[in-house]
Amino acid sequence: MKSWITMTLGWALVLPLQAFAQPVIPSDLPPAELARAAIEQEPSVVKARHALEAAGHAGRRIAASPYEWSVGIDSQRRRYDTGGNSNEWTARIERPIRIGGKAELDQGLGDTTERIARAELAQTRHEAARTLADLWIDWLAAIQARELAKEQLDFAESSASAVAGRRRAGDASLLDLNAAQADAAEARRQFDTTQAQETKAILRLRSRFPSLVMEPQSLSEPVELDLDEAQWRERVLAGSDTLRTMQESLKRAELTADRARADRIPDPTVGLFTASEARRSERIVGISVSIPLGGTYRKETMLEALKQADVARAELERQRKEIDLATAETINDARTALRRWRLAEQSAQMARENARLGQRGYSLGEGDLQSLLLLRRQSVDAAGASLSSRVEALKARNRLLIDAHLILGLADE
């Protein structure tokens, strides 16, 4: 008998997703058709697709049963005390047959085996979509980090030029000039580092998804989550491929237990035979039936299968709670990262403006170099914090959209 957990999750998995408002799709991810094509060629997805094909054969094998026809022939020579011999033989054909609804149970087991593989393929696509989205955002973030580093390099070189001009005018010391040039060299080092990080991001993305067309885009601004927490959690549970896999695994475990219970009544072997005896004067045709006598082995097999069903039922509930908790954590991550990004972006804009005003003032002979260098470093730190918070917020929202099967071609599943 199916548990209340199975029934509850069964209703959850068939909830119409259209019951909720459709969230806004991010503009900084690749188009769904291109992403889906790249995901289908990802190695783990290719492997899961082959596994589905193998599961189809396995399902048909289970449904067909391992029983096959067997033929046999016996030959003997009989000697009579009265004299003479008789060459005699027996030929037979026989096959075990499934009784007690076992054929229907085997058909169900075969179908469930294929459904599990199909759910695992969808789960693999889901994981590949998550990886694609993260690597894509990492690449766009690396581009933006390089652009920010270039701005800082231009700023530092401009400041060094201003110091050099004041040095020639006798208004700056050699120490100031060396400090400004060292700051420009550090900015150049940071720019080179961001270029290397961008190259690595490209390599990681192309290595995993070589067919994906990479067209640089600007990172979008994080936005508030479109749905409330309860709606997000319900959508994620409804679209969870992991839960679907666990549900089908539970069904298989329950069918296996039913099969083991039915197997306590052994399947008979039925056959036909014919024989020739007594110097071919006797022709025999008959039917044979043999039935194994069940014992402890069959009983313990049934008890084991029943406990394995309990294990699968507990695993389903554990997975449901883990997914629900992970979704709640992702929602919290998206919201807190959005707040941090807003604060960091405000700080970055003010730091950027302060650095610009400081440089302008220094060029006009106002202020000192150390203040200018401090303003630049504050601008660098604030811009980095803003970018990091932006990436964190975008990734968290993308994970929710992917888990709810709303982007990257997953809505079709």
Image (cartoon, rainbow, N blue to C red):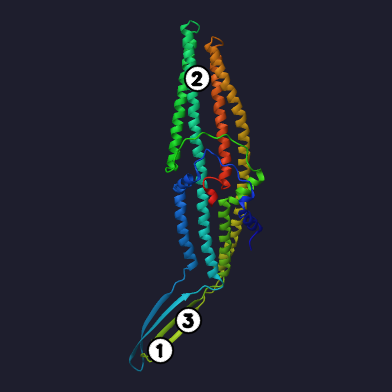
Helix, strand or loop for disc 2: helix
Q: Amino acid at mark 2?
A: Phe
Q: Is residue 75 above or below residue 116?
A: below
Which labelled disc corresponds to residue 155? 2
- Picture coordinates of residue 213 (x, y %)? 44, 41
> Distance of mark 1 from mark 2, alpha carbons?
109 Å
Q: Are marks 1 and 2 in contact (CB under 8 Å)?
A: no
Badge 3 density bin: few <14, some 14–19, many ≥20, Cα 10 Å: few
Front-lying residue, 91 or 378: 378
Q: Residue at x 61, y 44 (%)?
A: 327
Q: Earlier in the sequence, mark 1 or mark 2?
A: 2
Residue 312 shows in the view: yes
Judging depth in this view, the residue of 177 and 141 nearest the camera is 141
Given the current orientation, which residue lies at the most extreme bottom position?
Answer: 82
Q: Residue 288 has which mark? A: 3
Task: Return the residue at label 1.
Answer: 283
Q: Residues within 10 Å of mark 2 (few under 14, many from 20)?
A: some
> Quick one: quadrant of the N terminus?
bottom right
Mark 3–mark 1 Cα distance, whole angstroms, equals: 16 Å
Which amino acid lies under the numbered mark 3 shown in the image of this protein?
Answer: Ser
